[in-house]
Image (cartoon, helix red, strand yellow):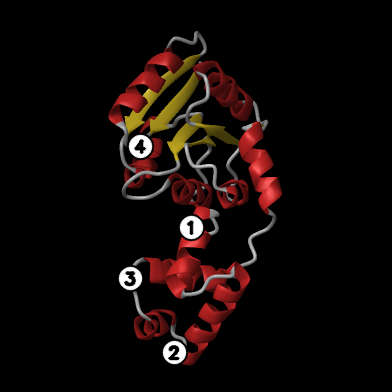
Amino acid sequence: MIKILLADDEHLIRGAVAALLNLQPDLEVVAEIGRGDQVLAAVREHDPDVAVLDIDMPGADGLTVAEQLRETGARCAVCILTSLGRPGYLRRAMAAGVRGFIAKDAPAEDLAAAVRKVHAGGRYLDAELAASAMAAGDNPLTERERQILRLIGRGMEAPGIAEALHLSQGTVRNYLSSAMTKLDAPNRLAAVRTAEEMGWI
């Protein structure tokens, strides 16, 4: 029996997915979580074989949780569910050790197949999501540029960012200018929006 932890903040969807997975003779949902920041504790408590994580949850998004699971040495394989086809997400998921990446509107049989495959040590990638990631190319932003754009997206200004990252304001402005040029963005908010739409931050 493959034990599954299911994390999704949409209660109806989570319940429906759990019910469909539980109909499979070899699958059992042992925990249902509604927030990303509750996943680590639930994994420790229930010791699932596979964690199925929604990419967009309160507390912590699915990719951040996947990174945390890898850092803490959790043994479960991770499968990401997403309704957002942002190309950068797939690349970030792969870097975080995610073994399955599947669209939220995929048939239940596909999700069950993905769970079995990642549990067996394989990979399961939604073909359309993989194709859009390939077409988009690599993330052009450096880690520091991504960091600064994330902080701007949270409403921080250059002086606060400089203080938080122990940089001069001039250095922050240089990173911002570089990111805006790479993203062909007329201003910092447009740069944040473009990077978010691509899944690069």
Assign a secondary structure to mark 4: helix
Q: Earlier in the sequence, mark 2 or mark 4?
A: 4
Q: Which residue is mark 3?
A: 155
Could you give the CA–CA distance between mark 3 and mark 1, rounded to whole angstroms?
Answer: 14 Å
Residue placed furthest toward the front? 186
User: Marks 2 and 3: CB-CB under 8 Å?
Assistant: no
Going from N to C along the chain, the mark reached first, 4 or 1, is 4
The image quadrant that residue 8 belongs to is top left
The answer to whether marks 3 and 1 mark residues whose Cβ atoms lie closer than 8 Å is: no
With respect to residue 152, does 43 lie above or below? Answer: above
For marks 2 and 4, give the CA distance: 41 Å
Viewer-nearest of labels 2 and 1?
1
187 relative to 62, above or below: below
Under mark 4, the amino acid is Ala
- Measured in 3D between alpha carbons, the distance from the residue under mark 3 to the one under mark 4, in whole angstroms, is 32 Å
Cα distance between the residues tagged 2 and 3 = 16 Å
The residue type indicated by label 1 comes to Glu
Q: Is residue 113 left or right of 84 when viewed as pictured? A: right
Relative to 103, 121 lies left or right: right
Of pointers 3 and 1, the one earlier in the residue sequence: 3
Pointer 2 or 1: first along the chain:
2
- Which residue carries the number 1 mark? 196
Question: Circle 2 sits on which residue?
Answer: 169
Badge 2: residue crowd in 10 Å (few <14, some 14–19, many ≥20): some
Q: Position of residue 198 (x, y in %)?
A: 55, 54
Question: Could you say where residue 148 lies in the image, as x and y percent from the top left?
Answer: 47, 73
Disc marking residue 42: 4
Q: Nearer the viewer, residue 153 or 18?
A: 153
Type of amino acid under label 2: Gln
Identify the amino acid type marked 3: Gly
